[in-house]
Structure formats: C-alpha cells, structure tokens
Amino acid sequence: MKEAPQLKEWPTFTGEGEYDHMSFLKTIDMLQEDYAIPDELITARLHSLFEKSAKRWYYGIRETNGKNTWSWWKQEIITKWANDAWKNKIENAFENSFFHSDKDKPLT
C-alpha cells in the first residue's frame, strides 16, 4: 500500500444543502484504488469525513449496525441520500443542459 493521503486531503460530506453523495463516494473509491487503501482504513476515517447531519446519521447507523465494510457503508449512503428529491434535481439539471437550436446560439 502506498501511503494514504492525509485526512485533510480526503473529501467531507455533510448531507445538507447542495450535497453530492455520489461525488463523495467516487472520490473515496478512487483513493482506495489509487492507494490500495483497505476497507478498514476507510471505515475508520468515516467519523472524521462526515460532518453535521451526516455525522449524526453515521453515529446512529454505526451504533445500531456496528463495524461494516466500505461497500456496506456506500450502500447505506446511497439508500439515505439518493432520494426522490435528489433524483429529480439530477434529472432536471440533465434536461436543462441540452442545446436548443431555436433558443441557444452555438459558440463560435
């Protein structure tokens, strides 16, 4: 294992406002792959990576379910934050990102 990045270089997640849980998960996955970080190190850092409401949620889930793998935690995060409001926000952003030839001018 290459030396893992310092904790301050890892992303944090609040679960509030304009959060993006998928970006958080992808970044952790890339760190794990790039540095061959074992699950145990990732899950041991979760209490420091979560902030505000996400941290409160984490403590409750951890107390109820105990220690688990990173894959298990990823699924719990997706279950918690990939709700209908988030999905609608992503779909709306995608729909609004199209080029409309009748309204938009191409870049020249």
Image: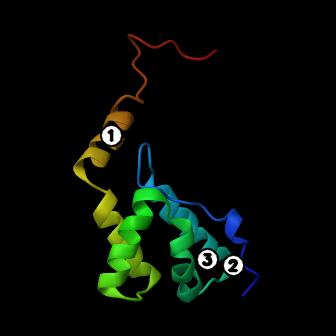
* Element class at badge 2: helix
The image quadrant that residue 44 belongs to is bottom right
On residue 33, the disc is 3
Of 13 and 88, which appears nearest the observer? 13
Residue 93 location, x and y as percent? 38, 35
* Element class at badge 3: helix
Q: Residues within 10 Å of mark 1 (few under 14, many from 20)?
A: few
Q: Residues within 10 Å of mark 3 (few under 14, many from 20)?
A: few
Identity of the residue drawn at 70% across and 63% down: 9
Q: How many marks?
A: 3
Q: CA distance from mark 1 to mark 2?
A: 33 Å
Residue 46 location, x and y as percent? 52, 74
On residue 1, the disc is none
Residue 70 location, x and y as percent? 46, 80
The image quadrant that residue 57 belongs to is bottom left
Disc 2 residue type (three-letter): Tyr
Q: CA distance from mark 1 to mark 3?
A: 29 Å
Image position of 49 with respect to 83: above or below: below
Residue 58 location, x and y as percent? 40, 71
If the image is split into quadrants, where does the N terminus sit? bottom right
Disc 3 residue type (three-letter): Glu
According to the picture, the residue beneath numbered tag 1 turns out to be: 89
Q: Are marks 2 and 3 in contact (CB under 8 Å)?
A: yes
Of 96 and 107, which appears nearest the observer? 96
